[in-house]
């Protein structure tokens, strides 16, 4: 199955277990989602005459019900959208702001040594719904209310719990049980639902109906906002009505770099998309195509590029509306060349950096394209699994924990919490162009691993010609701070899927990497990919087998 030069393929046994699936093909529309129900809903929208933007809104709404630990109305969203008719590509930033009372001094006075990850003090204003509506107003063709009906039906009538979803409920059951409305919604009968059981969320269904009828207005300035704010206040939250009323998506051109003749577009700060571009600029100076796709030499180069890019993030990155930091320098070819010189191809190094803890995360990424050439790279998230683990009263809305997850309590840090600020965001999504037209759409959930797995996937496809489904299912690795506090941020651990041969792992250890093997298929993430095959007029797609999602085309 595996040889020492880093080649890799699935064994017959793995294929027999269903790990290998074929690429999906279509001509008129394609959806790749971590949940098959959401993918089917998006496809049905396009089959009824909707475009990719209509489908994306319906998929996003549905994922908030079928993947409730990952995303929903209480989360954030970042999107790169390409409109063939308008000949434009825009990035939509749906990150929410910190509460009016969320000062560093407040948290310090309450005895916090670091930002909390659960409870109302971990929450920022949800920004996702504002992005959904902005996309629809600019590009949508079907009625807004119609796009929400599938999600409403799922929440009201129930969904069948899969094994993957059941495990995620069980992992957070102890935290969910601490909050009354969360326990009632997600732990019916006092326990996590198991695979094959039916789960419904009638409170959420009522809120979805209100959103379908009244749009984002009710969520940010109307009845739903009032009910969420009343709940937050009753729990000691620091939000004001203006925090919600003033929430707006930020629409801009995406940031981009050239990689071997392809234009790679990413979501702009506070998204960490710049980390992907910086790593590609560093890696472009190495002949990756001459190395085995899973060789120690290639893994080493990607891990070292990651460490250098993250060191830049840790020193400087914050909300660009408040912090002046050198984004254009970070994504420049000159900076990539300078950083590349710091890599020893034979020895691991540990760049000095101000410590900003890295986190795992729970997020959903999906991709949509249609036969007219429209394309969306779409990531939305509650941050951690079930976000703050707080359901906002009888609204059924699960609130994110993006403030707790992202901000620092160090008053000298550029990402220190302050009222109205957006935290530096793990969420990022990419779209690759060739000769001015969309060529590849992709992304993955995974917290700080997103900005590692995306370069792994991009270079696997561009440098090694890896097929889409193979790239989505491939063994992954990630560099992560070790558990020893004395070494935190200085000597990262390299966590590697054991499907990569032991000989490769040993070669990396010999280079100075601290290796932590991961169980086969346990590398994490849920990569979704769509590619435009313009020569044949076909859409191709791959969907990561790990979460049980699917790519569907017609």
Image: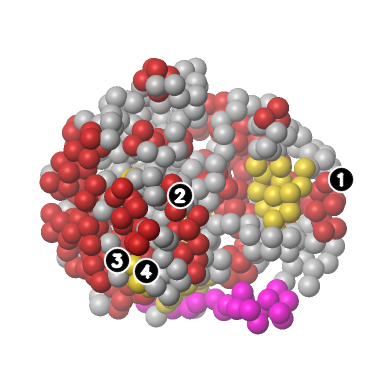
Task: Farthest residue to the front: give it.
Answer: 189
Circle 3 residue: 200
Left or right, residue 402 beside residue 350: left
Give the percent coordinates (x, y) of residue 311.
62, 31
Look at the picture and state if 14 lies above or below 483.
below
Q: Secondary structure at mark 2?
A: helix
Is there a contact, CB below 8 Å, between mark 2 and mark 4? Answer: no
Circle 2 residue: 174
Q: Which residues are magenta?
A: 10-36
Q: Secondary structure at mark 3?
A: loop
- Label 4 Cα crowd, 10 Å radius (few <14 / some 14-19 / many 20+): many
Dot 2 or dot 4: first in sequence order is 4
Give the percent coordinates (x, y) of residue 388.
39, 43
Is there a contact, CB below 8 Å, between mark 1 and mark 3? Answer: no
Dot 1 or dot 4: first in sequence order is 4
| Quadrant of residue 351 within the rendered picture | top right
């Amino acid at each position: 199955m595996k040889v020492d030069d880093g080649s890799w393929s699935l064994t017959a046994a793995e294929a027999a277990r269903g790990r290998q699936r074929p690429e999906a093909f279509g001509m008129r529309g394609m959806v790749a989602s971590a949940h098959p129900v959401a993918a089917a809903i998006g496809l049905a929208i396009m089959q009824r005459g909707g475009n990719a933007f209509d489908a994306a809104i319906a998929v996003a709404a549905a994922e908030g019900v079928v993947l409730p630990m990952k995303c929903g109305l209480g989360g954030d969203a970042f999107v790169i959208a390409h409109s063939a008719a308008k000949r434009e590509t825009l990035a939509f930033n749906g990150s929410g702001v910190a509460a009016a009372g969320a000062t560093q001094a407040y948290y310090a006075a309450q005895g916090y040594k670091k930002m909390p990850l659960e409870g109302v003090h971990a929450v920022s204003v949800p920004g996702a719904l504002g992005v959904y509506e902005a996309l629809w107003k600019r590009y949508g063709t079907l009625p807004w209310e119609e796009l929400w009906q599938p999600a409403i039906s799922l929440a009201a009538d129930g969904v069948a719990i899969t094994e993957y979803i059941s495990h995620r409920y069980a992992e957070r059951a102890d935290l969910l049980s601490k909050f009354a409305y969360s326990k009632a919604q997600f732990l019916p009968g006092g326990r996590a639902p198991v695979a094959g059981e039916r789960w419904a969320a009638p409170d959420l269904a009522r809120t979805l109906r209100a959103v379908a009828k009244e749009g984002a207005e009710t969520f940010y300035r109307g009845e739903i906002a009032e009910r969420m704010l009343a709940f937050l206040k009753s729990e000691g939250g620091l939000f004001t009505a203006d925090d919600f009323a003033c929430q707006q998506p930020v629409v801009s051109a995406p940031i981009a770099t050239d990689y071997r003749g392809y234009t790679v577009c990413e979501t702009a700060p506070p998204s960490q998309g710049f980390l992907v571009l910086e790593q590609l600029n560093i890696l472009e100076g190495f002949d990756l195509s001459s190395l085995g796709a899973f060789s120690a030499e290639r893994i080493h180069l990607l891990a070292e590029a990651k460490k250098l890019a993250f060191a830049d993030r840790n020193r400087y990155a914050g909300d660009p509306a408040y912090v002046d930091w050198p984004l254009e320098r970070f994504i420049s070819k000159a900076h990539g060349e300078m950083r590349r010189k710091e890599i020893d191809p034979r020895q691991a190094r540990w760049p000095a950096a101000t410590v900003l803890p890295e986190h795992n995360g729970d997020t959903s990424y999906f991709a949509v394209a249609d036969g007219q050439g429209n394309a969306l790279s779409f990531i939305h998230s509650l941050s951690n699994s079930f976000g703050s683990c707080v359901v906002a009263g009888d609204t059924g809305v699960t609130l994110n924990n993006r403030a707790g997850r992202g901000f620092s309590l160090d008053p000298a840090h550029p990402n220190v919490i302050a009222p109205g600020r957006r935290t530096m965001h793990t969420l990022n999504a990419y779209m690759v162009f060739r000769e001015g037209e969309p060529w590849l759409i992709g992304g993955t959930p995974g917290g700080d691993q997103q900005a590692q797995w995306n370069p792994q996937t991009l270079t696997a496809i561009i440098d090694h010609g890896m097929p889409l489904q193979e790239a989505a299912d491939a063994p992954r690795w990630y560099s992560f701070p070790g558990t020893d506090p004395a070494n935190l941020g200085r000597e990262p651990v390299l966590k590697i899927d054991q499907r990569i041969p032991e000989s490769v792992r040993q070669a990396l250890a010999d280079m100075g990497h601290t290796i932590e093997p991961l169980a086969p298929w346990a590398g994490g993430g849920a990569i979704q990919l769509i590619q435009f095959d313009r020569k044949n007029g076909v859409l191709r797609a791959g969907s990561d087998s790990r979460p049980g999602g699917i790519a569907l085309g017609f």
